[in-house]
Image (cartoon, rainbow, N blue to C red):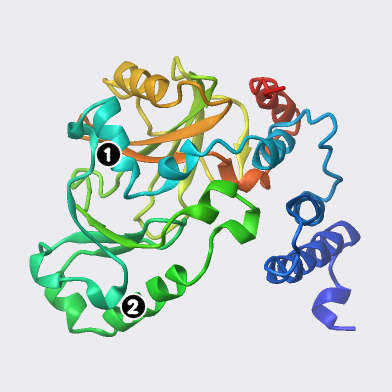
Amino acid sequence: MNMKIKNIKPQKLKGYVFSKLSVIWRSLSKIIPFDVVYLHGYYFLLMEKKLNLKNPRTFQEKLQWLKLNDRNPKYISLVDKYEVRTIISKKIGEKYLIPFYGVWDSFDDIDFNILPDQFVLKATHDSGSVIIVKNKSEFLNSTDFAKAKKKITKKLNYNYFYAGREWASKHVKPRIIAEKYLFNKKNNDLSDYKFFCFSGIPKLLFIASDRFKGGKTKFDFFDLNFTRLPFSAHGHPHNDKLGKPKNLDKMIDIATKLSEGIPHVRIDLYNLNGDIYFGEYTFYHDGGFVPFIPDEWNKTIGDFIELPK
């Protein structure tokens, strides 16, 4: 037996084994045809407990139920980072859109001549494909260019649906968009306000901060009065320096309008020096595979979701 494994305590060893098995299960995602079978297995390996779909009670269980049962065709355009721009413009106004430079089907199609010195590239169909360019000339003449091409090309050739069975993503056309690089020079950061909405009513939010400072991104949960809530996720540290934004009410109003008629969705907004920008629609927070700590909050937040009959 590997000495590193031999010295792991039983509970941690169980977590280690489940983690390794979840990677194997995910690698089989394309050949497991039934969504319900895949989700039962993946949920069990990541959460270390059975998935209850007959009577879902926790936030994470209800997200899995929604993946399988709430397949509204309009969700496809909402998660498409290009198509959603038209919807946002009509619903709340073009001023809330991040300035846009172009859309392309492949990395080789990108016309870098029309892009400014700083910009962001991202795929339209997934999460995690963001490429931040702070100096175009340096980027184009460094190994970062080849790395970016490899990363985005790989993302374009992968259907984001398979990993967590997030239904709407399956039907989004993979493309690349370029947007303005948003950055707050005052604090070397850009806070991301994520509102958890339930049938058009925002109930709570979390703020992702310190994203570009070299350490772990900090996650802080609040109610809509901006009172810190006593739970966490991912084990991320807190940011005690966060202050209530002056235009919080406006962000709540935007989240309300954008989430209308949807059983549950997370509305992500950026706030840069008082200017609000739409980020994205997120229907399945962390894929529904990351619990809140302490455990009772999984049921508390799950109670906010009223599942369609």
Q: Position of residue 230 (x, y in %)?
A: 61, 27
For the N terminus, the image quarter is bottom right
Q: What secondary structure is found at the residue carrying circle 2?
A: helix
Residue 131 found in image quarter: bottom left
Tell me: residue 70, above or below residue 254. Answer: below
* The C terminus, quarter of image: top right
Quickly name the residue at label 2.
149
CB atoms at circles 2 and 1 under 8 Å apart?
no
> Relative to residue 263, is residue 1 drawn left or right?
right
- Residue in the foreground of this view, choosing between 142 and 43: 43
Image x and y of residue 42, in percent: 76, 56
Of the residues tagged 2 and 1, which is closer to the observer?
Answer: 1
Whether 271 is drawn above or below 237: the answer is above
Q: Is residue 53 visible?
A: yes
As drawn, 86 above or below 38? above
- Label 2 crowd (10 A; few <14 / some 14-19 / many >=20): some
Position of residue 132 relative to residue 6, above or below, is above
- Of the residues shown, which amino acid type is indicated by label 2? Lys
